[in-house]
Amino acid sequence: MAKGQAYNYERIPRVDPVTGTRYMQLTSFPTINMHLSYSYPNLTNGFTADSRRVVFFSRRAPHRTAPWDVFRVGVDGADFVQLTECEGIRGAVVSSQKPLVYFHSNGTLYSVDIDTFEEKEISHFETDHNQHGGRFSAWLSADERFCFVSVFDKSGHELIVRHATDGSGTTVIASAEEMRIHSIDPAGRGLFASLKENGGWVIWLVDFEGTRAVRYGENVCSHLSPLGNTGTLQGCAVWPEHSLLLLTPGQKQENRLLSGPDFWHSSASPDGRWIVADTNRPNEGIFLVNVATRRSAVLLHPHNLGGDAPWSHAHPFFSPDMRHVAFTTDATGSAQVCLLEIPASLMEQLALP
């Protein structure tokens, strides 16, 4: 494999036998493939801004220490191209303004052009620790001035580092022991993060310097992200509570949007009108939820195993044009990236009062 290498189609058209929902398995190679973060690391999650391509990770070989590479593929399964060939990649995020993917490796932030494959080194945070990444993610501010990553310093302590995308330098804004980043605010105000208070975790909107700006309250979610650009957060309640929750600043208690299965990972549409969520214990499928009517339905059953490994989680999220939902499943024995078509008739049905 090599950067810029185009590959033959791996797509497999499929239909869920229970719901009838059509979906495309975009990858088939028997190694670990998984899409980028589902929880607003940027404005488009793992899609390009035009909704025509999905960016994803693929492990170079089927063994536990194999490096990760970043790929792109069209929503029709064509245009399957490798974007990186770099050791130690620990996170990537797609620009919504330029044809770029930002990724970090061994303390260094890079960009790669998804069309020309030109790669640039942007900035470096010094580390000689043998585990060069913290969390397997990166977060890009709405104006794309900053990219935030989790890295280890020389002593092995995990830090949240802000890289200026113009190459002007890096700044440590917090230690990971004190802050857990969930997502970027689509309105550009800062980061949504949990911070330690009196032995517990409280959700804050944190500005790009690491200062606490708006308090959202105790973190009662297993996973959470913005409800689009509304200023509200949505998330899946901590087990054994089976609910989708809404959280707003100053609210004494979270608002239960919907109860039912054990919702696990959820993501909202850019306008905040829709939520898509996977489930666990038991896995009852990927659900589509209308926020206004609080009605829901199963989109399909991904049959992912739902273990500790992140590539065994469906982690669904919407395309910017709301035509597709991307998800990962290991139902075939190795994790693969899939794309489902959202049935227009189902959206119309769920929008009815």
Image (cartoon, helix red, strand yellow):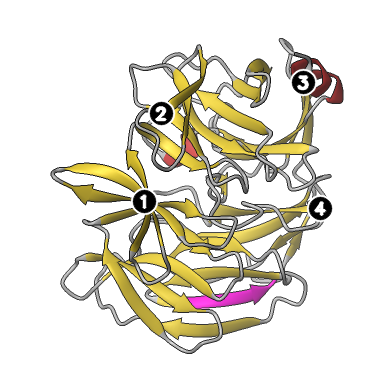
Q: Quadrant of residue 230?
A: top right
Q: Nearer the viewer, residue 68 or 119?
A: 119
- Circle 2: is it few (<14), some (14-19), or many (20+) Cα within 10 Å? many
Q: Type of residue at label 2?
A: Glu
Q: Quadrant of the N terminus?
A: bottom right
Residue 204 circle label:
1
State how far apart marks 4 and 1 are (Cα). 34 Å
Q: Type of residue at label 3?
A: Ala
Q: Which residues are magenta?
A: 109-113
Q: Type of residue at label 1?
A: Trp
Q: Nearer the viewer, residue 175 or 316?
A: 175
Q: Give whichever of discs 1 and 3 has the lower sequence position.
A: 1
Q: Which residue is mark 4?
A: 52
Note whether 167 is above or below 291 in the view shown. below
Q: Quadrant of residue 14?
A: top right
Q: Give whichever of discs 4 and 1 has the lower sequence position.
A: 4
Q: Is residue 164 left or right of residue 344?
A: left
Quick one: SS at disc 3?
A: helix
State how far apart marks 3 and 4 are (Cα). 26 Å
Foreground tag (3 vs 4): 3
Magenta stretch encompasses residue 184: no
Q: Contact, CB < 8 Å: mark 1 with mark 3?
A: no
State how far apart marks 1 and 2 are (Cα). 14 Å
Quick one: SS at disc 1?
A: strand
Foreground tag (2 vs 4): 2
Q: Which residue is mark 2?
A: 254
Q: Is residue 98 left or right of residue 161?
A: right
